[in-house]
């Protein structure tokens, strides 16, 4: 009965109504910002490279804030999520992932702008923020219960999405490919994550700042090699993606065929699951950035969606299509593994290393999100017990079956989005106002210098 209830919740939070709300919020914000999040992508990269050094109050550099948020988004969604979308929705799902990413950039931008604008200083002197704080401080005390709901869902979701599930995936990969007992891998991961957590957000950000670029480059390089080896098939793959997006995909090989609606639904759902635009997780990291400008941090934040989906998910999707595995029997991560194994020498080992790194950084990034959510609910005294439970959960995850945990995590993850989307829509005038003032000032300063 409990599992049936969870299934019903999932049917709603990842169903058409919720996906329409997520997509609709992104479209509304994109229009309200007059397409700024798309036209200012080069500007955002310029701010990112400047952001290696912070300027203003905060705990971590703007660059490391993005790396911390990417540590939680670049993960199994890029490997298994893309394969699931294409395996069920056909190649056209990749097109709809692109569409969701373009409007999701506006959502991620707005989240970070509000997070920095309404952040607080906690009892330990740390800058903290996120949806629970911009709900409380932006919408007033009457809405504080909504912030509490987000914090409750967020503090619990991490134990599934980024704790037990991630450690279980790594332990299974290490056991299958390298014969490492799950007990050993569980102990090692718990010790490593525990050592990083002791240093708080500053140590998490330093580790993420080094690991995230390395693992992203490793994965992108591997996929790029596969694409270059199949370069002649790329134009046909792109045509297939666009055609399938509007006409569905006919049954081929082990693929059962997909309609336009299935391609759209799977593309949007898996795209949002991968880049987390609208879920409210990333702004918790961006609120800790050393910055004196919410808008500048917002432009950096929106690159998280660009890098995660428009770069990494795209390369995964194209690899699955050009190698032909998309229409075969393997589904999810097994499909991506088949592509790497067939196309690259030691491809299975390379993908296994990527899975381990992706999962490890996800455990770090989400530990901070969960910790901040728990602190909002119960105060700073909860931080140490939370970290202890987090480390224990990592080991437990390697020793258990996680089918129900996956379902519960999906439900909690989707429920996080509801309070966040309400806040984004209600506070959108603030986002538009801050953005307009910032770029008007930039234009005046540029005009003055040119004179």
Image (tube, grey):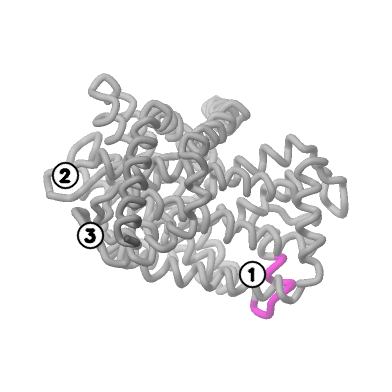
Q: Residues within 10 Å of mark 1 (few under 14, many from 20)?
A: many
Q: What secondary structure is marked by label 3?
A: loop
Q: Is residue 178 above or below residue 167?
A: below
Which residue is found at the position 49% from the left and 46% from the top?
105
Residue 309 rendering spot, x and y as whole percentages: 57, 54
Left/right placement of residue 88 relative to residue 451 reads: right
Earlier sequence position, callout 2 versus callout 1: 2
Residue 121's disc number: 2
Left/right placement of residue 294 relative to residue 319 reads: left
Q: What secondary structure is marked by label 2?
A: strand
Residue 55's disc number: 3
User: Foreground: 356 or 144?
Assistant: 144
Query: Could you say which quadrant of the image residue 108 lies in?
Result: top left
Magenta segment, prevailing SS (helix, strand or loop): helix
Residue lying farthest to the top in this orientation: 142
Q: Which residues are magenta?
A: 338-346
Residue 58 belongs to magenta span: no
Q: Is residue 206 above or below residue 22?
A: below
Residue 252 seen in render? yes
Q: Quadrant of the C terminus?
A: bottom left
**What residue did someone put label 1 on?**
223
Left/right placement of residue 433 relative to residue 333 reads: left
Earlier sequence position, callout 2 versus callout 3: 3
Q: What secondary structure is marked by label 1?
A: helix
Which residue is found at the position 27% from the left and 66% from the top?
53
């Amino acid at each position: 009965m409990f599992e049936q209830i969870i299934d019903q919740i999932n049917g709603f939070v990842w169903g058409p109504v919720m996906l329409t709300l997520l997509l609709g919020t992104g479209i509304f914000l994109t229009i309200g910002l007059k397409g700024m999040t798309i036209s200012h992508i080069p500007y955002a990269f310029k701010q990112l490279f400047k952001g290696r050094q912070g300027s203003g109050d905060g705990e971590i550099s703007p660059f490391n804030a993005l790396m911390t948020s990417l540590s939680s988004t670049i993960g199994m969604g890029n490997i298994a999520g893309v394969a699931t979308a294409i395996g069920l929705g056909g190649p056209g799902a990749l097109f709809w992932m692109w569409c969701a990413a373009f409007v999701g950039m506006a959502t991620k931008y707005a989240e970070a702008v509000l997070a920095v604008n309404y952040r607080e200083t906690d009892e330990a002197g740390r800058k903290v923020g996120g949806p629970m704080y911009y709900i409380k401080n932006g919408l007033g005390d009457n809405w504080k219960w909504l912030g509490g709901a987000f914090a409750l869902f967020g503090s619990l979701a991490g134990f599934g999405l980024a704790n037990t599930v991630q450690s279980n995936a790594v332990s299974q990969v290490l056991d299958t490919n390298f014969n490492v007992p799950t007990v050993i891998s569980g102990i090692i991961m718990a010790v490593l994550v525990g050592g990083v957590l002791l240093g708080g957000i500053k140590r998490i950000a330093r580790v993420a700042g080094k690991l995230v670029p390395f693992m992203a480059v490793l994965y992108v390089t591997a996929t790029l090699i596969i694409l270059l080896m199949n370069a002649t098939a790329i134009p046909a793959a792109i045509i297939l993606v666009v055609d399938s997006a509007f006409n569905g995909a006919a049954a081929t090989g082990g693929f059962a065929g997909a309609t336009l609606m299935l391609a759209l639904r799977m593309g949007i759902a898996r795209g949002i699951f991968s880049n987390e635009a609208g879920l409210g997780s990333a702004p918790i990291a961006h609120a800790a950035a050393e910055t004196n400008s919410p808008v500048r941090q917002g432009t950096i934040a929106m690159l998280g969606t660009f890098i995660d989906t428009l770069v990494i998910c795209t390369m995964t999707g194209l690899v699955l299509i050009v190698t032909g595995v998309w229409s075969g029997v393997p589904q999810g991560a097994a499909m991506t593994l088949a592509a790497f194994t067939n196309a690259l020498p030691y491809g299975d080992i390379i993908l296994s290393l990527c899975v381990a790194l992706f999962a490890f950084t996800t455990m770090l990034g989400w530990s901070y999100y969960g910790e901040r959510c728990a602190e909002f609910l119960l105060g700073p005294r909860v931080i140490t017990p939370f970290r202890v439970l987090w480390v224990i959960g990592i080991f437990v995850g390697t020793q258990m079956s996680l089918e129900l945990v996956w379902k519960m995590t999906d439900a909690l993850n989707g429920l996080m989005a509801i309070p966040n989307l309400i806040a984004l829509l209600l506070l959108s005038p603030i986002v538009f106002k801050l953005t307009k003032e910032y770029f008007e000032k930039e234009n005046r300063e540029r005009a003055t210098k040119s004179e």
